[in-house]
Amino acid sequence: EADIYQTPRYLVIGTGKKITLECSQTMGHDKMYWYQQDPGMELHLIHYSYGVNSTEKGDLSSESTVSRIRTEHFPLTLESARPSHTSQYLCASSEANRYGYTFGSGTRLTVV
Amino acid sequence: GQQVMQIPQYQHVQEGEDFTTYCNSSTTLSNIQWYKQRPGGHPVFLIQLVKSGEVKKQKRLTFQFGEAKKNSSLHITATQTTDVGTYFCADDTGRRALTFGSGTRLQVQP
């Protein structure tokens, strides 16, 4: 079954650590996205990609990086985690916008 | 930057009552998408509206796009406990990625 997978599901790390959140999709979608969402709040765009070797910054991109070496894989890296990074990180992909985004289950990150 | 506001922020209804959430923008919206996020879950795509004045229905859900394409609404008839969650509208400008609204959280009392 085609789907989008995020790992880990939950993560607790110390301040200053470097972490990578994984996102993979099996649908062959060219477009992929990372959003940050605090519980019950709106989604804020971090980074997005229109295809291999294409990445663009969103509104909250300054403290993270992404790469798109393969169509199916779009990892997000925080170089130095801070308590303000505590949030849920949602990965999504789309074929064409009229079909909507398919979201992964998210990674809930806590930085202590 | 563009802001997409939703009202109300939160609504608590009795099961069987109707519910409406409104999505408003100061600028003309391109295409509007609606998503539902269950508590503890992730957003799930419901529908996309493209044309001015467009109305679409999915069972008890009715989606409408304003004539001036500056607002949209989602109406649920006779709510059920399964309708609980946060409903987001999102503007698809086609230029980058979706801009999500602030969301309306719906609580349904059995």
Image (cartoon, coloured by chain):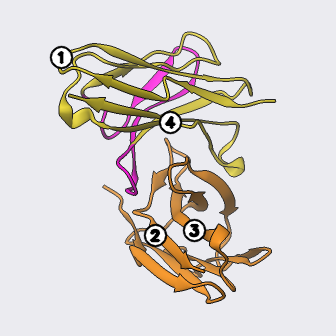
Chain colours: A yellow, B orange
Q: Quick one: label 4 or label 1, which is nearer the N terminus?
A: 1
Please state which amino acid type lies under the numbered disc 4: Gly
Compared across the picture, whether A55 is left or right of A87 comes to right
The residue carrying mark 3 is: B84
The residue carrying mark 1 is: A16
**Label 2, residues with CA under 10 Å away: few <14, some 14-19, many ≥20:** many
Q: Which residues are magenta?
A: A37-62
Cβ–Cβ under 8 Å for marks 1 and 3: no
Q: Which chain does tag 4 point to? A: A
Q: Both on one chain, marks 2 and 1?
A: no
Quadrant of the image for the N terminus of chain B? bottom left
The residue carrying mark 4 is: A106
Q: Residue at x 65, y 30 (%)?
A: A4
Q: Which label sits on residue B50?
A: none
Instruction: Where is residue A105? Give x, y as percent.
Output: 56, 37
Q: Which label sits on residue B104?
A: 2
Instruction: Where is residue B23? Give x, y as percent.
Output: 48, 73
Label 4: which secondary element: loop
Using the rendered view, name the quadrant where residue A41 is placed.
bottom left
